[in-house]
Amino acid sequence: MSTQTEYNTVIRHCKDLFIKKTKDYGTAWRIMRLTSITDQLYIKAQRIRTLEVKKVSKVGEGILEEYIGIVNYCIIALMQLELGEDGEENLASQFVEEKYNEKVNETRDLMLAKNHDYGEAWRDMRTSSMTDLILMKLHRVKQIEDNDGQTLVSEGLKANYQDMLNYAVFALIKLGLAEQ
């Protein structure tokens, strides 16, 4: 299976859950500030790291579910970046699905370009390294947020959220979600 096919399969799983939760909860996430979304991503990534180290989950959901959460929260962050924190809270599900697809397509295109240049190096990485890279990117995002979004020479928030999304998809591919 090609990377793009695997990527799309993983995204279908994540999107299916996202759309179902949107039907259950609406777009309650619209109330969240970007810093709160970043903290939610941090909680999920830190939990993955803890589970990787301790090898036991006491609350049932495991690493796979947390990576799916990272994918979906990264997409929420990308939507919030575009829509702003002060906009309409109750978004139509069709609009949300269109935005979800838009953010995924932009991020997948970035992945394909980088994957070409890096020669699919991610396939030889450990999923624990992907967790650590996501955590590192979260620390970068927190610093950018603390600097009011300003950077001197570094990538901004969007690029970091996209990289985290792609690392989470890669981890889900390695964990077998693309085969389900």
Image: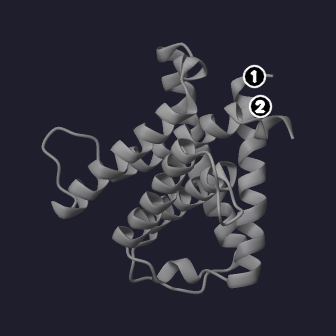
Q: Which secondary structure lies at badge 1? A: loop
Q: Position of residue 77 (x, y in %)?
A: 46, 62
Residue flagged by tag 1: what amino acid is it? Ser
Q: Is residue 22 left or right of residue 102?
A: right
Applied colour scheme = one colour
Q: Position of residue 59 (x, y in %)?
A: 66, 66
Residue flagged by tag 2: what amino acid is it? Thr
Q: Is residue 51 left or right of residue 155?
A: right
Name the foreground residue: 81 vs 9: 9
- Residue of label 1: 2
Q: Which mark is residue 5?
A: 2
Task: Report the residue at 47% width, 15% height from top.
Answer: 117
Q: Is residue 153 visible?
A: yes
Q: Position of residue 155 (x, y in %)?
A: 28, 41
Task: Report the residue at 78% width, 60% height from top.
Answer: 16
Picture quadrant where residue 9 is located: top right
